[in-house]
């Protein structure tokens, strides 16, 4: 079988995107793992299927798989999925789409893409020491505030926190966050990838909410990752919840191709 695909990235977070609106993609963990492998496959931080809408009012459904074939929500992946859907349909208007965590709205803002995220009703603040928060933004994220993100041994600290007993059974993504003027800098150890990624959209949102809670930084809040800069918008309802959440940033088509599977 010849599989047509496109490779996109959002601030260095790269994805394989497949038009699966006819439902023909053979969802097999071994295949997904091989396609995402950077040595024996195409290579990516995840694989995304653009599928037919699953409910009324939606334009499409996004199915996201990590490189280990586990399912989750992905913020940067959602932004790339919306951009890919726009190319497939030759249109640049807004689109409502569903993902594993619920419904989202994608919008073009010039050359950048914004997506909405569901409201966050619970923030576990200072739960593992004064400098650690935990927020679920479609995927679980631990936010560890540090003086200097570049000084963190992320391949030691990331796995230790990702597999901590109190995060069982699913574990968590781990984000190391540093205050930087009216914005923040962050690095992420991402579960499912089991390594540092250049950017993590849902982690950027979680870090942004943690920054709003702790430091009352004005929105839109700028978040700098190793792969680029994004913005987070949100309204703090009270100290435990947020609504009107959006993630905004650049996307780019890297290449298209076919692979025999």
Image: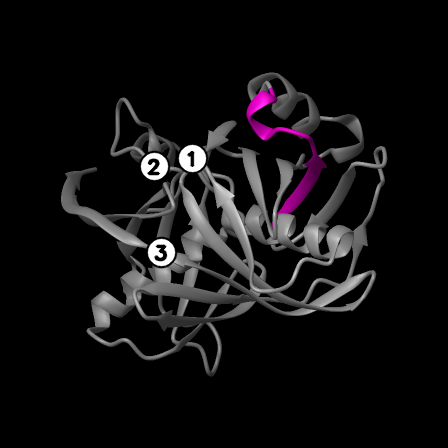
Q: Which mark is residue 44?
A: 2
Which class describes the residues within 10 Å of circle 3: few (<14), some (14-19), or many (20+)? many
* First in residue order: circle 3 vs circle 2: 2
Measured in 3D between alpha carbons, the distance from the residue under mark 1 to the one under mark 2, in whole angstroms, is 7 Å
Q: Secondary structure at mark 1?
A: loop
Measured in 3D between alpha carbons, the distance from the residue under mark 3 to the one under mark 2, in whole angstroms, is 17 Å
Of 152 and 181, the residue lying toward us: 181
Q: Which mark is residue 250?
A: 3
Give the answer, above or below, for where 109 lies relative to 72: below
In the picture, measured across the screen, residue 70 lies left or right of residue 79, that is right
Q: Position of residue 100 (x, y in %)?
A: 54, 58
Nearer the camera: disc 3 or disc 2 = 3
Instruction: Verify whether residue 142 appears in magenta.
Output: yes
Nearer the camera: disc 1 or disc 2 = 2
Q: Residue furthest bottom?
A: 57
Q: Which residues are magenta?
A: 139-152
Q: Are the residues flagged by discs 3 and 2 in contact, CB closer than 8 Å? A: no
In the picture, measured across the screen, residue 167 lies left or right of residue 129, that is left
Circle 1 sits on which residue?
Answer: 67
């Amino acid at each position: 079988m010849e599989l047509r695909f496109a490779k996109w990235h959002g601030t260095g977070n790269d994805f394989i995107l497949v038009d699966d609106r006819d439902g023909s993609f053979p969802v097999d963990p071994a295949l997904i793992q091989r396609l995402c492998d950077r040595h024996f496959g195409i290579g990516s931080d995840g694989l995304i299927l653009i599928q037919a809408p699953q409910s009324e009012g939606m334009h499409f459904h996004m199915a996201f798989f990590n490189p280990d074939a586990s399912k989750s929500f992905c913020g940067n992946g959602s932004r790339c999925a919306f951009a890919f859907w726009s190319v497939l349909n030759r249109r640049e208007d807004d689109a409502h789409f569903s993902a594993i965590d619920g419904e989202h709205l994608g919008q073009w803002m010039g050359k950048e893409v914004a997506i909405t995220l569901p409201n966050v009703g619970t923030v576990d603040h200072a739960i593992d020491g004064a400098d650690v928060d935990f927020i679920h933004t479609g995927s679980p994220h631990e936010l560890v505030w540090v003086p200097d993100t570049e000084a963190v041994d992320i391949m030691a600290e990331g796995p230790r926190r990702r597999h901590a007993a109190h995060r069982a059974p699913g574990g968590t993504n781990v984000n190391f966050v540093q205050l930087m003027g009216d914005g923040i800098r962050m690095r992420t150890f991402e579960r499912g990838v089991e390594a540092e990624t250049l950017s993590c959209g849902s982690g950027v949102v979680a870090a942004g909410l943690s920054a709003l809670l702790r430091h009352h930084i004005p929105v839109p809040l700028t978040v700098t990752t190793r792969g680029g800069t994004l913005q987070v918008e949100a309204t703090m309802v009270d100290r435990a919840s947020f609504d009107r959440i959006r993630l905004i940033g650049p996307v780019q088509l890297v290449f298209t191709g076919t692979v025999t599977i």
